[in-house]
Amino acid sequence: MQSNEFEYTLNDNDIARYPVSPRRSAKLLRVNSQGDFEHGTFEDLPQYLKDIGCDGLWANETKVIQARLYLRKPTGGRLEIFLLEPVDVVPEVALSALQTSSWRCLVRGGSKWTAETASIETDGLTLHASPIDPVAGLIREDGGSFQLTFTWTGALSFADVLEKLGRMPLPPYMQRDSDVTDADDYQTVFARLPGSVAAPTAGLHYDDHLLMKLAAQDIALRRLTLHVGAGTFRPLSEGDISDHTMHAERCIVTRDILENLASTRKRVATGTTTLRTLESLFWMAVVHLETGEFPETLGQWIPYNEDHSQSREVVFTSYEAAVRYLLNNAPLDSPWDFKTQIMIRPGYKIQSVIGLVTNFHQPGSTLLCLIAAFSSTPWKDVYAEAIENKYRFLSYGDGCLFEL
């Protein structure tokens, strides 16, 4: 299967650069299991979920950090730094650090910046950035990132520093700088654990009013965590999609989460990141059953047969059985975290849910591969329907409910 099979024409005026208000007024395209379309808004989501007997609606409660920083070099030139992930520690530790924190970053404007320090000062707070090894200077890693150390004065944590000096990391396809409204708009109302550099965008459609309507239908919002990385925007490699190297992202789950999963059958995932986490739990159970180990990173092709075209056979008879296995074997005395690199592509068998709420995604993306794997209706037909009916695309755009 070739990467060019996941291309379509996305016109510039179809891309949403600002969200609608209220959030729940965004359009929602319902695609049922027979391939029929129904046009509504997120106000209709509680009824749609009731129609299919949903007994668990899941969402990603990760919180986006203000990961874009604009600093000045000693020469006066502007330096744009985009935080990707901490060096050698988890985000919770790096963000709680006092006075110094080291991160992998993308750097724009650094062609003549070597071992010097760049700075920003606002309201009495000064932040400095320098290469993690001042002697060696900037060393470009695979993927184009650099390791930087940030230092600052005062008793603030690095999370507080970013809140004061950072900017929301809007995706490049919005073609604008973030403004003060994005600090709220590009964050879900249930965001709790900081660590993402991109929003789990399907969750941006939920507001307190919609959550109350869902609860009135006895559909409580359940939450787990996957910290979204910048790799989510990486396009598919040219050629066969089996040659694409999938990015890894960190998942965090608890015993309560697994107990809730084990007690339900008709789950719906809000967003591709939520689905990726739920599916990864199934395959973590498979790996442990087969090897006796829980890997730190769940490999890209673990769910597949040898040619990576179809899901392989497993012992578990149901998703619930796999979750019960995890309850008996996973390290759950504290929140369990691991990285997942799995790639969901056509041929993959969905294990965890009967529905997926998601936005409309970029051409040539791994997210479109996931949609193609999930939907029995050809994804190009769904996207053509959305374009014809003036749906808004990408992060601040409208949504779609796929039903299995």
Image (cartoon, helix red, strand yellow):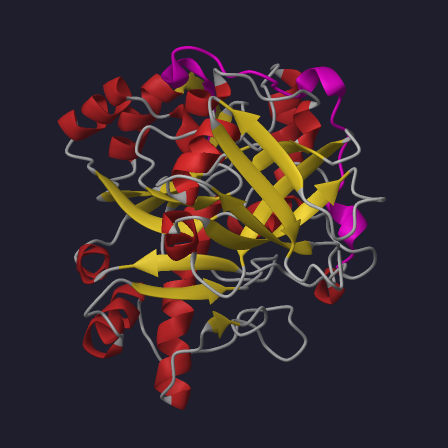
Residue 278: quadrant of the picture:
bottom left
Q: Position of residue 390 (x, y in %)?
A: 62, 14
Foreground: 70 or 174? 70
Q: Is residue 175 above or below residue 371?
A: above
Task: Please indicate whether residue 265 sits to the left or right of residue 126 in the image.
Answer: left
**Range of the magenta residues?**
1-30
In the rendered image, residue 20 lying in the magenta stretch gets the answer: yes
Question: In the rendered image, which quarter is residue 133 located in?
Answer: bottom right
Question: In the rendered image, which quarter contains the N terminus?
Answer: bottom right
Tell whether 101 sits left or right of 190. right
**Residue 32, percent from left and from top:** 44, 35
Q: Residue furthest top?
A: 21
Q: Residue at x 22, y 28 (%)?
A: 214
Residue at the image position 65 percent from the left and 33 percent from the top: 71
Question: Would residue 217 be found to the left or right of residue 166 on screen?
Answer: left
Q: Nearer the viewer, residue 136 or 348?
A: 136
Inspect the magenta stretch and tell me whether residue 220 lies in it. no
Give the answer, above or below, for where 401 lies relative to 139.
Answer: above
> Is 296 rendered above or below residue 138?
below
Q: Is residue 67 visible?
A: no
Nearer to the camera, 312 or 96? 96
Above or below 389: residue 367? below
Q: State whether residue 147 appears in this view.
A: yes
Residue 58, image x and y in percent? 31, 44
Q: Residue 198: x percent and y percent?
A: 53, 39
In the figure, residue 83 lies in which quadrant?
top right
Residue in the picture at 69% in, 29% down: 173
**Residue at (75, 35) in percent of width and height:** 8
